[in-house]
Amino acid sequence: MELKNEKLVRMVNISKYFGEVAALRKENFEVGYNEVVGLIGDNGAGKSTLIKILTGVHPPGKGRIYFQGEEITYHSVERARELGIETVYQERALGEQQALWKNIFMGREMTTHLGFLQVKKAKKETERILKEVIGFTAAGLTPDSIVERLSGGEKQGVAIARALHFKAKLIILDEPTMGLSLSETKKVLNFVKGIKEQGKSCIFITHNIYHVYPVADRFVVLDRGRTVGEFIKKDISLEKLVNKLYLVARTGEISQN
Amino acid sequence: MLKRYLKLSEFKLQWSIFAVLVALFTLFIMGAPRIFLAPDMYYSFMSTIPFMTIMALALTPVIICKEIDLSFPSVMGISAWMFASLSASTGNPTLALIISLITGLLAGLLNGILVVKVGIPSLIVTIGTMFFWKGLVLVFSAAGGITLVPLRGTILFQSLVGRIGGVIPAQALWAVGLAFLFWLILNRHKFGTHIYFTGDNIESARMMGIPVNKVKILVFTQLGFFAAFAGILLDLEMSYYWPTSGEGYLLETIAAVFLGGTSAFGGMGTIFGTFIGCIIIGSLESGIISVGLSGYWTNLIYGLVIVISVSIHSILRRRT
Amino acid sequence: MRSLTIKKQKREKIKTLKDYLKLSEFRLQWSMVAVLAIILAVFTIRNPRVFLSFRIYYSFMSIIPFMAILALALTPVIICKEMDLSFPSILGFSAWMFTSLCASTGNPTLALIISLITGLLAGLLNGILVVKVGVPSLIVTIGTMFFWRGMIMVCSGGVGKTLVPVKGTILFQSLVGRIGGVIPAQALWAVGLAFLFWLILNRHKFGTHIYFTGDNIESARMMGIPVNRVKILVFAQLGFFAAFAGILLVLEALYHWPTTGQGFLLPTIASVFLGGTSAFGGMGTIFGTFIGCIIIGALEAGIISIGLMGFWTQVFYGLIIVISVGIHTILRRRT
Ligand SMILES: Nc1ncnc2c1ncn2[C@@H]1O[C@H](COP(=O)(O)OP(=O)(O)OP(=O)(O)O)[C@@H](O)[C@H]1O
Ligand SMILES: [Mg+2]
C-alpha cells in the first residue's frame, strides 16, 4: 500500500527545550524501510532526546511525527510500541532489584484478562530468549536472577533481548556498545546485522564511528540540536567520514562535498 | 548457583524475621508458660493485632513505591468518626460503612494527587494531611465519644468483628484474607509488578511505558480505603468511638512494615514480612507484661527489636 | 576549540540557571515571610487587643525557642538527605538525665554537662547505625525513638520529678531567665544558635560538605568529601541540641514528665519543610526554618486568641503545610 519512496519514520520540525536548554532545534530526521541509520554526535548533541521523542517518552511539542506515512497524533510509549518501535535506552531502563523475567516483560506483562501474571509462561519465554536471542548460556543466568547482580554486558544483553523479542519494525539502540568488551561489542553488531537481514530498520546511536560504520547504511551527524551532515555509506569511506567528524568537532560546521 | 544465592538472601531475610518471631514466642512461653500455652492469649492477639495489620498491609505497597504516608492514622480517625456518627444519626450502619470507606478513599486520593500532580514529596504532604484530618476529627467530634453499642448483633457487626465459632475474632480472618489479597496483587498481578518497578527506578519504569503516576495515585488511594476499613473495624470492636482512635498507630505500623524487610529505598518488600512484623510488634506489649516485666519496658524492647532486626536486614542485603 | 566554546556555552547556561535558582530560592524565602506576615495580620485584625500588646510576643518568645532549636539542628540532617524521628525521645531522655542528676547531685552544671553528652552520644549512635551498619535513617530512628522513650519510662518509673530547687541559680538565669525582666533567655539562645547554624551552613567548609553530601552523595565521595563523617556529625549535633532543648524545656517548666518531648516530632519536621528545606536533600536554609518555626508556633497561640477552639489548630497546620509546600514546589518547578 505504502508508496515505495515513503519513509518508515519521518520526524519534522522537532524542537525540544529543557528549561532554557535547547536540546533540539527544528530537527528533521528520517528512517527508511530496511535501513540502518547511524546517529552520531557529541555528548549533549540531542541524540537521546530525539529518539525519546520518537518513542513517546517526551512529547513532540510543535513538531510532527509520521510513521509509515501516517501522522501520529496521540503519542505515548504504548502507542510507539503498538506501531512496532522497540528501544534499548542508553540508561538501559531496567528495574535493577527485580527478577530478570519481570524486566523482560516490563510495562507489558504477560497476563490473563484480569491482569494476573502468567508467571510460568513468562519465565519459560525468558529462558528461551536468554538462549536463542542473546545466546547467554553463562552459568547462573536464569529468569529468576536479580538484574542488579548481572555484569554490565549481561544487563545490556537483557535490554537488547527485550527489544528484539517483540516483533518490531524499528529497533532503536542508544549507545548499545557503551562499556562492553570487544567480544560483546561484536555480538551487538551482529544483532544489528541480523535486524537488517530480517528486513527491519534500526537507529544505531553511538560516539564510536568505528562501531557503526560497518553496519549502517546512512549516517546522520547531530550537533547541538540539529543535523549538520548526512552521508550515505556508499558515497563515503571510513577515513573520509572520520575526517568530517573531526571537522564538525572543530568548527561545528560540515561541508557536504 | 548465583541464583540460589540470590534467592537465598531474600529468603534469609524473610526467615530471619520469622526466626525473630519464633525466638520471641519461645521467650514468652518460657517466661509465662501458663499464659502463652493457653489459647486465650492468642484469641486476644487475634482481636487486637488485625487493625494495625490491615494498615501495614496497605502501607507496604506505598513504601515499595518509594513513597511514605504519615496521614493514614488520621484518615483512619476521620473515617472512624464518619462511621460512628453516621451510624448513630441514620441508624443505617451499611450506609455509614459505605460513606466512611469512600471518605477514606478520597482522603487517600487527595494524598496521591498532591504527590503526583503538584509534586510535593509524600513525606511532607502527608504530614500536612495528617494534621488536617486529625484537626477535623477534633473539630467535628468536639472531643466527645460516640457509643456504638446499638450496632452489636447486626449482621454487619457479626461479619466484621463477630466471633466465628464463638472464639475466633472475624477481624483476624479479614486480616488474613487481605494479606492473601495483597500477596496476590503484588506477586501475581500486573499492578504489583508496576508497583515494584515504579519504586525501583521511576525513570526506567516511565520509559518502559508503566503509568507511574497512576500507579502512585492508586497506591495512596488504596491505603486511604484500608485505613478507613481498619477504623470501622476498630469502632465496632470497641463499640465506642473516641476522638483519639487511630492515634498511636503511626510509628508502630511503619515499624512493622520495615521490620518485615521492606526497603526504605523502594522496589523491595514482601507481604509475608509485613505480616510477621505486625505480629511481632502487636504481641510484644502483652508478652512483656505477661513475663512479669513492667509495661515501662515495652518501648525500650520495641526499640531494641527494631534496631537489631533492621540492622540484620541491612547486613544480609549488603553481603549478597 | 569546540570543547572550549561548549564549556563556555554551558557555563553561561549554568550561570543563568543559577541566577534563576537564586531568584527562586529568594522568592521562596520571601514567600514564607509573606505567609507569616499574613497570618499575623489576620490575627491582629481579628483580635487587635491581644496582638498589639507585648504579652503575646512574650509568650511566643518563651514557647517557640524549644522547637526552634530542634528545627535548626534538624535542618542539616534533612539537607543531608537523612531523617531523624528520634530527637524528641532523645530530648526526653536527656531532660530526665538532667532532672534526676540535679536532684541527686545538687550540681546543675554537672547535670547539664552529662545530659548534653548523653544527647550527643544518642545522636552519635544514630549516625553510626546509619553510616556503619547501613540502616536507612528513617527506620533506625524509629527504633531509637522507641528505645529512648522506653529508657525514660524504665528509668523514671513513669513518674515526674520537680526541678524547683534549681530555680534562681546562675544556670537557670542564663538559660531560661528573663533578661531585663522581659525577654526570655531561651529566645536569645534560639536566635544565637540560628546565627551559628547559618554561619556553619553558609560560611564554613562543613556546611558546604553537608549540602554536597545531600545533593549527590556519590559525587561528594568522589570529590573527597568525607561523607560518612559528615553524616555522623550531623546526627550527633542533632542529639546534642535535642538535649539542650530538653534542658531548657524542663528548666522553663521546672518539672520533668515522662512524656516530656512528645508532641514535638511532627510540628518540628513540619516547620523545617515549611521553611523550604527539600525532602530530596541538598537544599534548605536556616532562615526558612526559623520562619517556619515562628509560623507553626504562632498559629496555635493565635488561633485560640481569635476565639476559635484549639481543635482548629491542627486543621490550620495541615492547610498551611500543604499550601506553602505546594507553592514551594511549584516555584521550584518553574526554573
Ligand atoms: N531530562 C532532562 N532534563 C534537562 N535537560 C536534559 C534532559 N535530558 C537531556 N537534557 C539536555 O538536553 C541536551 C541533549 O541531551 P541528550 O541526552 O539528548 O544528548 P545525547 O546526544 O544523547 O548525549 P550523550 O551522547 O552524552 O548521550 C543536553 O544538553 C542535556 O543536558
Ligand atoms: Mg544520549
Image (cartoon, coloured by chain):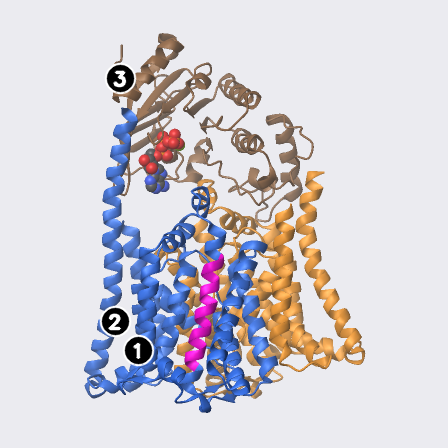
Chain colours: A brown, B orange, C blue
Amino acid at pointer 1? Ala
B207 w.r.t. C268: above or below: above
Of marks 3 and 1, the one in the foreground: 1
**Residue drawn at the location 45% of the way across and 71% of the way down:** C242
**Residue drawn at the location 43% of the way across and 15% of the way down:** A213
Circle 1: element type: helix
Q: Which residue is disc 2 drawn over?
A: C36
Of marks 3 and 2, the one in the foreground: 2
Q: Which residue is disc 1 drawn over?
A: C298
Please, which chain is the residue tagged with disc 1 on? C
Near mark 1 (Cα within 10 A), the count class, few <14, some 14-19 or many ≥20, is many
Q: Quadrant of the N terminus of chain A?
A: top left
B244 w.r.t. C273: above or below: below
Q: Which residue is disc 3 drawn over?
A: A254
Q: Is residue B164 visible?
A: no
Amino acid at pointer 3? Ile
Residue A222 position by quadrant: top left
Q: Quadrant of the C terminus of chain A?
A: top left
Residue A149 position by quadrant: top right
In this orientation, which residue lies closer to the viewer: C25 or B73? C25
**Residue B153 % position (x, y):** 63, 84
Same chain for mark 3 and mark 2? The answer is: no
**Residue C328 % position (x, y):** 30, 59
**Main secondary-structure element of the magenta-colored stretch:** helix
Circle 3: element type: loop
Circle 2: element type: helix
Q: Is residue B211 magenta?
A: no
